[in-house]
Amino acid sequence: MKKINELVFGFSDAENYKRRENKNLFNQVFLRNSYLENIIDPSTTFLVGDKGTGKTAYAVFLSNNDYKNTACSIRYIRETECNFSISLCKT
C-alpha cells in the first residue's frame, strides 16, 4: 500500500496536462469512451458545454496524441464571441 505522500492526484484542470512533463500521467488516467468516438467524427467542429463537463480534457487528449489519425488543436474563444456565434445559429 502507498503512503499518502506517495499518492499522485494530478491536476484538477486538464489544461495543465498540455505540458510535456504531464502528458504521460494524463494518458494513463484519461477515460476513452464512446463520446471520444463522437468527437472525432469529421462532422464535429466545436465542443460546447458547461464548465467541468470534460471539453478541455477531450481537447487536450486529442491534441497530445495521434488518436486514430485525428489532428486536433485547441483554440479558446471569449464569451462574447461564443454568444455571438450562438445568436447566429438561432437565426
Image (spheres, grey):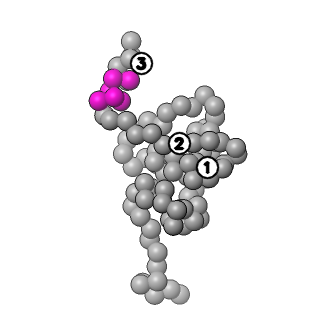
Residue, far left? 80
Asked which secondary structure carries label 2, the reply is loop
Residue, far right? 68
Is residue 29 in sight in this rendering?
Answer: no
Name the residue carrying label 3: 89
Residue range corresponding to the magenta coloring: 80-85
In this view, the residue in front, 27 or 7, is 27
Whether residue 3 is in magenta: the answer is no
Across and down, in percent, residue 16 comes to: 43, 59
Q: Which mark is residue 63?
A: none
Kind of residue sitting beneath label 2: Ser
Is residue 43 in sight in this rendering?
Answer: yes
Mark 3 and mark 1 lie on one chain; the one further toward the N terminus is 1
| Residue at 35% in and 30% down | 82
Mark 2 and mark 3 lie on one chain; the one further toward the N terminus is 2
Asked which secondary structure carries label 3, the reply is helix
Q: Main secondary structure of the magenta part?
A: helix
